[in-house]
Amino acid sequence: MRFDLKLLWVDDLDMYYKENKEIIEMLVEDLGLTVQIEYIQDARTFLDRIKREESGFKTFDMFFIDYSLSFDIVGSSLIKELRSINVDSDILFYSSEHEADIRETISKDLGSFEGVYIANRNNFDEKSTYLIQKNSKRLSSLSNIRGLLTDQTSQNEFIVNSYILQEYPKLNDQQQKGITEMVLNSMKFQKLDFDSSADKEIKKIEENGNLDIKKMFKIRNFLFTLDMKNQVFQKITEFNNITMSDGTFFEEYKKVTKLRNKLAHKKLEVCAGQKHIISSDNIKQHNDRMCSSDCNALTIDDNKISMAQWESLRKQVLNYGKFFDSILEKLMEETPVT
């Protein structure tokens, strides 16, 4: 599962965590994002956990930390520990009784507490919402737009490949024959563009009368294309009675994949009016497509993406990810790690 935001939550009373966890997840999902929440109840476990942040990749975007923790550890000492190992993520520091103490502690050492936000139990929702929205804004940067599309669709393609390899051999002869004919017809069409390579592969399949599905993944991509893999994947899910309520799912998903492929190989830049993302292959296209400072966000252009379009697309990608993740869960259950 791709996660846009990662949150570490430290509170020795799991009741408060459980009461608010679903609210946070709903808020994030409403923004068209996903969040992974790791909960730690023991402050000493937290101190051990963050040691990995010092020597490895930084993992968390935000921390929610209670002030009064077990073993006479107060949240301020945990924050200083984080800052000492250069963890600069936002921290929401909350308490039902000690808000004044928190503010006094921070006022005495502003340098250590930069990026720290204070809340009590009454305004926790407001402050946590602000921090989530603040951290979500960075996901509208060009690098994150490209990264989200590439990351999630690549994850989906991994699941498609895994599912086909595992489930195709389980199909009955008639089902396998139907998929074989579908792949053959597609490859014969591809043959028009890539004659000699296609001839060899088509001949092998016709002689065998069936697919060696593992070998299909080793042949050149222009013969066993991504679109063809998605068609095989769709057929197998249908045979296994896995269907989407929306009959247009795969057609819509194909559009998102094509957009990912388009954006992955083009220069992206925000237009002068900051209303669109402009994609271009060269400087002439860049200059021709660039909007003026008074551009209209409603402008329709295949080479422009508005903020509204991006937000809609982001939610689509999230929904597709949920479907593919459900497939991955089934695969993991059937193929336990040894």
Image (spheres, grey):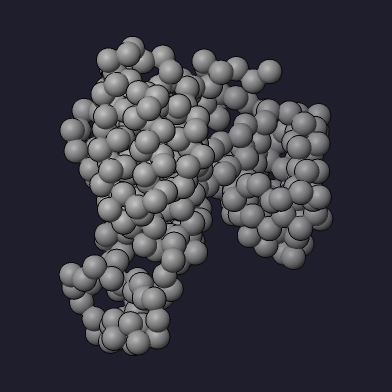
Q: Is residue 322 above or below residue 125?
A: above
Instruction: From the top left corner, tell me how far across and down residue 13 is, in percent.
Output: 63, 26
Residue ID at (35%, 52%): 195
Q: How many marks?
A: 0
Q: Is residue 271 visible in this depiction of the protein?
A: yes
Q: Residue at x 51, y 39 (%)?
A: 218
Q: Is residue 67 above or below residue 131?
A: above
Residue drawn at 27 percent across, 59 percent down: 309
4 versus 167 height, above or below: below
x and y, in percent, of residue 93 in the image: 62, 47
Q: Is residue 107 visible?
A: no
Picture quarter containing residue 185? Answer: top left
- Where 220 falls versus 84 (above or below)? above
Q: Nearer the viewer, residue 272 or 235?
A: 235
Along the line of sight, which residue is nearer the eye, 239 or 128?
A: 239
Rendered image quadrant of residue 8: top right
- State which quarter of the image contains the C terminus: top right
Q: Is residue 27 left or right of residue 51?
A: left
